């Protein structure tokens, strides 16, 4: 594997420090055990995963040069108005390389960098080096180590001081090869007083064999900066998705994570916010929909280091037809995080007899001058609510769908519109089969 | 043409709680159903609307000749039956407007032609009931007071335009000013089964008939003269 990593690094013309980081990742990956909690990952055959797929096409910047086949796949994935969106500034990942990268002139003028990570590493090595795998440590766990060793692709965003981008930046990426492993690395640096909304969406066609996806997202929110990061995860039902996301938020900065997990066979995803500076804030909204054969283990972590920091976690999960969901969260307040506030609410809705939902909330609080609230609800659709809606002329399926939609509403209303369409379609399906 | 109940028997948790009730409401009629707590008034209302917790075990119920008892709650609503709930449940994330839009599509013969027409009608009826516009985008019954929930029930009644409405203690929780609004729902062809404990409501909705229910049976029936008797003596004397 070492020779593969050296080859990846060489192919990409990377600086030496990056190769060293990769090799350190490999060393840790080989010695670290699989997690002893959460979903069973022993079925992953690391030997069978294709860690690096060299792109057949060169990076394209003009939509008219994008191959027709790629456009068709965009259409098949149902990405609405993909062309317009892509043209307005999207980096899209095709397998492990960038086939398309378009950057608005306006952003360039403002000094914003929005580039594929592979290119950015070559162009801005000194800018990136102090941040790369710094929010997520290489040896954080077996998969962060694997990611460091074989990462490829992803997006780099740099916002200079005071630059506020009103229009969301979007990155669509997906994998489409058998045994394709994706290890994209995304870094967002938001300098003092800057603002950004970033939308990450993934969608995968169906495969015959298991696929592993271990992406990393690192966000650095500087003083008074604001970043909102929205994700929809819609991998096909045989993907194991173990992505990591972590933000470090400085004084009076604000970080928002909005995530919806719909696809994959197994997902483990716990976006983390480290409230480092005084008055820093984090909001986590997540929605997980697990159907037959799916196990979605999601949650969030908020670590309060500064004074007057505040964090909110709202998690909604639905399991249907034997699907399994778990909320796994951590709120940590260190000694000295005075006047910190945390509020966690996690609700699960269980549809069907074989479905399962679990909740593992943890709070570690070492400071007394704080407020921490936790609320958890797990249950089925209330017969009374169902009858109420039916007494207004709604069929059982319509009423069920309305109740499920209402359950998710707090999260869905914060998602980009085009995601909501996909989620509603899935909810209607769940409603029709809610007894399974 | 009528909402007709004949010898209806209803069980709840395997116990017979409605023991052979008969009554009839014609279009435009108001029938008051009174009685002490636990006499079976709400159970009757729920059984009529098709609540699965109150299954019928005997007798009949029909709307304009169509049998109700083998129909699902939504099919009963489509035939023109409306239940204003005593304690309507909160359904979080489902706005008053979105519920009503679906309900109108399902129940009404004369639908709103456009979403815009529906909104206009909704706003118009809300104004009639002195309902704040901002309520319409909130989750139905989520965080509303008892009286406010009752107003939302009335709003649904006005929008759905049923043939027969069962008002289950619509007056409880309503203040005097809101009680007056009840007069607004009284339309010439609407048949009303008015379930109540208190006679105050009769100033605004004048019943044609009064029934007293006790222990799952109709203990007395008559005209408005019964109201005075109840006000004077309570329910103790009916058997």
Image (cartoon, coloured by chain):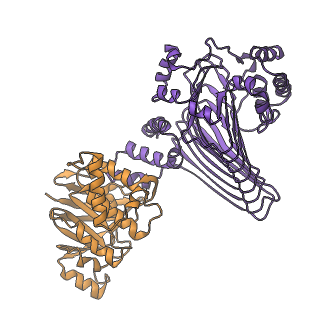
Give B72 or B205, whichever is nearer the viewer.
B205
Return the residue found at the far top. Answer: A56
Give B209 or B111, whichever is nearer the viewer.
B111
In the picture, measured across the screen, residue B161 lies left or right of residue A216, that is left
Coordinates of residue A281 in the picture (x, y in percent): 68, 53
Figure quadrant of residue A22: top right
Please name the residue shown 30% across and 53% down the image.
Answer: B119
Please name the residue shown 81% across and 55% down the image.
Answer: A334
In the picture, measured across the screen, residue A38 lies left or right of residue B195, that is right
Q: Quadrant of the N terminus of chain A?
A: top right
In the picture, measured across the screen, residue A246 lies left or right of residue B227, that is right
Q: Which chain is orange?
A: B
Coordinates of residue A269 in the picture (x, y in percent): 67, 38
Q: Which chain is purple?
A: A
Coordinates of residue B30 in the picture (x, y in percent): 20, 69
Please name the residue shown 77% across and 36% down the image.
Answer: A131
Can residue B69 be spotted in the picture?
no
Return the residue found at the far bottom. Answer: B232
Coordinates of residue A372 in the picture (x, y in percent): 70, 60
Can residue B120 be spotted in the picture?
yes
């Amino acid at each position: 594997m070492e020779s593969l990593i050296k080859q990846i690094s060489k192919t990409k013309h990377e600086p030496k420090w990056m190769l060293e980081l990769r090799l350190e990742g490999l060393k840790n990956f080989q010695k670290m055990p699989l997690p002893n909690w959460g979903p069973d990952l022993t079925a992953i055959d690391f030997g069978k995963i294709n860690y690096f797929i060299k792109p057949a096409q060169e990076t394209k910047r003009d939509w008219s040069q994008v191959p027709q086949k790629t456009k068709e796949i965009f259409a098949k994935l149902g990405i609405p108005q993909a062309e317009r969106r892509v043209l307005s500034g999207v980096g899209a990942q095709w397998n492990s390389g960038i086939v398309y990268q378009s950057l608005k002139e306006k952003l360039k003028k403002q000094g914003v960098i929005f580039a594929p990570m592979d290119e950015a590493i070559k162009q801005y090595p000194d800018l990136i080096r102090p941040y790369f795998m710094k929010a997520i440590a290489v040896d954080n766990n077996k998969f962060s180590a694997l990611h460091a060793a074989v990462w490829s692709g992803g997006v780099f965003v740099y916002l200079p001081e005071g630059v506020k981008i009103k229009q969301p930046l979007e990155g669509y990426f997906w994998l489409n090869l058998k045994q394709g492993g994706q290890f994209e690395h995304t870094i967002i640096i938001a300098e003092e007083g800057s603002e950004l909304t970033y939308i990450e969406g993934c969608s995968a066609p169906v495969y015959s064999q298991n696929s592993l996806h271990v992406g990393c997202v690192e966000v650095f929110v500087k003083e008074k900066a604001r970043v909102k990061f929205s994700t929809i995860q819609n991998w096909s039902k045989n993907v194991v998705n173990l992505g990591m996301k972590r933000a470090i938020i400085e004084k009076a900065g604000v970080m928002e994570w909005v995530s919806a997990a719909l696809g994959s066979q197994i997902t483990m995803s716990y976006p983390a916010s480290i409230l480092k500076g005084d008055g820093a804030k984090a909001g986590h909204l997540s929605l997980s929909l697990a159907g037959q054969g799916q196990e979605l283990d999601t949650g969030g972590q908020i670590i309060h280091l500064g004074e007057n920091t505040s964090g909110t976690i709202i998690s909604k999960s639905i399991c249907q037809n034997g699907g399994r969901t778990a909320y796994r969260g951590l709120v940590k307040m260190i000694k000295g995080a005075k006047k910190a506030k945390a509020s966690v609410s996690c609700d699960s809705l269980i549809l069907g007899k074989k479905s399962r939902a679990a909740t593992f909330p943890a709070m570690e609080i070492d400071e007394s001058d704080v407020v921490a609230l936790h609320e958890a609800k797990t249950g089925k659709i209330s017969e009374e609510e169902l009858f109420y809606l039916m007494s207004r002329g709604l069929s059982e399926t319509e009423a069920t769908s309305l109740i499920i939609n209402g359950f998710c509403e707090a999260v869905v209303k914060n998602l980009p519109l085009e995601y909501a369409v996909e989620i509603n379609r899935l909810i209607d399906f769940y409603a029709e089969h809610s007894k399974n | 043409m009528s909402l007709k109940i004949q010898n209806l028997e209803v069980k709840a948790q395997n116990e017979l709680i409605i023991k052979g009730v008969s009554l009839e409401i014609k279009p435009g009629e108001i029938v008051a159903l009174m009685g002490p707590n636990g006499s079976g008034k709400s159970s009757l209302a729920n059984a009529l609307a098709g609540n699965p917790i109150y299954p019928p075990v005997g007798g009949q119920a029909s709307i304009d000749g169509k049998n109700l008892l083998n129909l699902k709650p939504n099919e009963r609503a489509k035939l023109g039956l409306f239940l204003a709930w005593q304690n309507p449940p909160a359904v979080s994330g489902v706005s008053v407007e979105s519920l009503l839009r679906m309900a109108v599509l399902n129940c009404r013969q004369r639908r709103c032609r456009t979403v815009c027409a529906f909104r206009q009608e909704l706003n118009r009826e809300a104004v009639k009931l002195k309902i704040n516009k901002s309520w319409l985008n909130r989750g139905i019954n989520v965080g509303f007071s008892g009286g406010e929930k009752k107003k939302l029930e009335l709003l649904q009644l006005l929008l759905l335009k049923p043939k027969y409405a069962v008002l289950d203690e619509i007056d409880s929780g309503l203040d005097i000013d809101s009680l007056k609004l009840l007069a607004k729902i009284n339309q010439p062809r609407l048949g009303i089964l008015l379930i109540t404990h208190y006679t105050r409501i009769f100033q605004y909705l004048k019943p044609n008939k009064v029934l007293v229910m006790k222990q799952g049976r109709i203990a007395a029936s008559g005209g408005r003269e019964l109201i005075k008797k109840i006000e004077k003596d309570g329910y103790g004397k009916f058997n």
